[in-house]
Amino acid sequence: MVAPFETAALALEPGQIAPELVETDFGYHIIKLERKLGPSTAKPAPAAPGQPPAPAGDSYDARHILISTGFKDPENPTAREAPVKDYVRNKLETEKEKKLIDDIVAANNISVPTDFTVPEVTEEQMQQMRQKQQSQGMPPGAQMQPGANPEVKPGKPEPKKPEPKKPEAKK
């Protein structure tokens, strides 16, 4: 459990409900301690950065109601719900990056032709590339060097192609 939740739960007596809402990155919790089980033999999980360490080794059963402050990005329907703080931070960082790139492009007179298009890659082409990489022993996500011969194993020099012989000039 996260430190604020665990601290609040362990401060309660069995059967007691926390008098205040407990705030975590997930939202607000109403916590009821069911029972304290005593010292645990398991090693406590490391605390999150900026959080105090969890009480050493106490285990307990608790119930809680979560009032979520998570937010699902409407621009990305496949994204999972994230804490509002994280969503806002990511959104601001993305906007800053875009503005910085726009400023660099404007300051350096960079332009991209209007008729430039990025070719679409089909799922079938992606599968073929993955199979080719796996057959070469490359880790997934690694890319081949342009002009590399896929038939040659890394570490071995490419075989030299015979050069055509030039006819000798008659004297």
Image: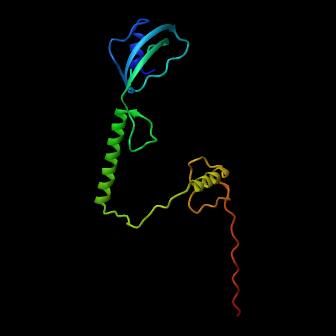
Q: Quadrant of residue 41?
A: top right
Relative horizontal placement of residue 10, taking residue 125 as reference (left or right): left
| Residue 115 x %, y % | 40, 67
Nearer the observer, 69 or 9: 69
Quadrant including the C terminus: bottom right
Q: Quadrant of residue 158?
A: bottom right
Residue 99's place in the image compared with 38, above or below, is below
| Residue 126 x %, y % | 58, 53
Residue 123's place in the image compared with 24, above or below, is below
Colouring of the image: rainbow
Residue 139's place in the image compared with 149, above or below, is above
Residue occupying the point 46% across, 9% down: 34
Q: Quadrant of residue 52?
A: top left
| Residue 125 x %, y % | 59, 56
Furthest residue toward bottom: 171
Residue occupying the point 42% across, 43% down: 76
Tally of numbered discs:
0
| Residue 39 x %, y % | 51, 8
